[in-house]
Image (cartoon, rainbow, N blue to C red):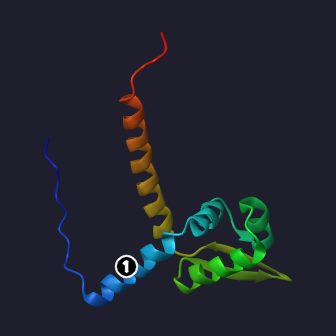
Amino acid sequence: MHIQKHTHSVLTDEALEMLASRFHVLGDPNRLRILNHLMQRDHSVQQLVESTGLRQPNISRHLRVLRTEGIVQRRSEGNHAFYSIQDPTIMQLCEIVCDRLLGKLLQNLGSLPNTSK
């Protein structure tokens, strides 16, 4: 089996800091929970409270972090603010990671002994 290697440039220290910051932001399960819902459709803070089970102050804090990182954006409609994914690469990254984890899970399940007889 041949594994294709991708050429990759050596990153500067500044680029590595930016990369680490992005992965740090994505390393929080509650932020991933919020992003999971935003990948389906735009949500208001109240809708995110209802769909995630998180409290409003927590949702607002996580959305602020995600906005600062440029991952989500906010738009106003009357008295309501709606949030959506701003950076489409986030959805691609989540799909890649989720597909890989699913493959690993299925592989692990396939290696379990069959106890039903």
Q: Is residue 15 left or right of residue 21?
A: left
* Residue occupying the far bottom of the picture: 14
- How many residues crowd around disc 1 within 10 Å: few (fewer than 14), some, or many (20 or more)? few
- Say which amino acid is labelled 1: Leu
Residue drawn at point x = 44 percent, y = 77 percent = 22
Q: Which quadrant holds residue 75?
A: bottom right
Q: Which residue is mark 1?
A: 19
Q: Is residue 78 above or below residue 90?
A: below
* Residue occupying the far left of the picture: 2
Q: Nearer the viewer, residue 62 or 3?
A: 62
Q: Position of residue 65 (x, y in %)?
A: 58, 82
Local SS, label 1: helix
Q: Which quadrant holds residue 81?
A: bottom right
Residue drawn at point x = 17 percent, y = 68 percent = 7
Residue drawn at point x = 38 percent, y = 43 percent = 104
Q: Is residue 100 left or right of residue 82?
A: left
* Residue occupying the far right of the picture: 79
Q: Position of residue 56 (x, y in %)?
A: 77, 75
Residue drawn at point x = 38 percent, y = 84 percent = 18
Q: Is residue 27 left or right of residue 62?
A: left
Q: Is residue 64 above or below residue 52?
A: below
Q: Position of residue 80 (x, y in %)?
A: 82, 79
Q: Position of residue 29 (x, y in %)?
A: 56, 64
Q: Nearer the viewer, residue 93 or 53?
A: 53
**Quadrant in which the N terminus is drawn:** top left
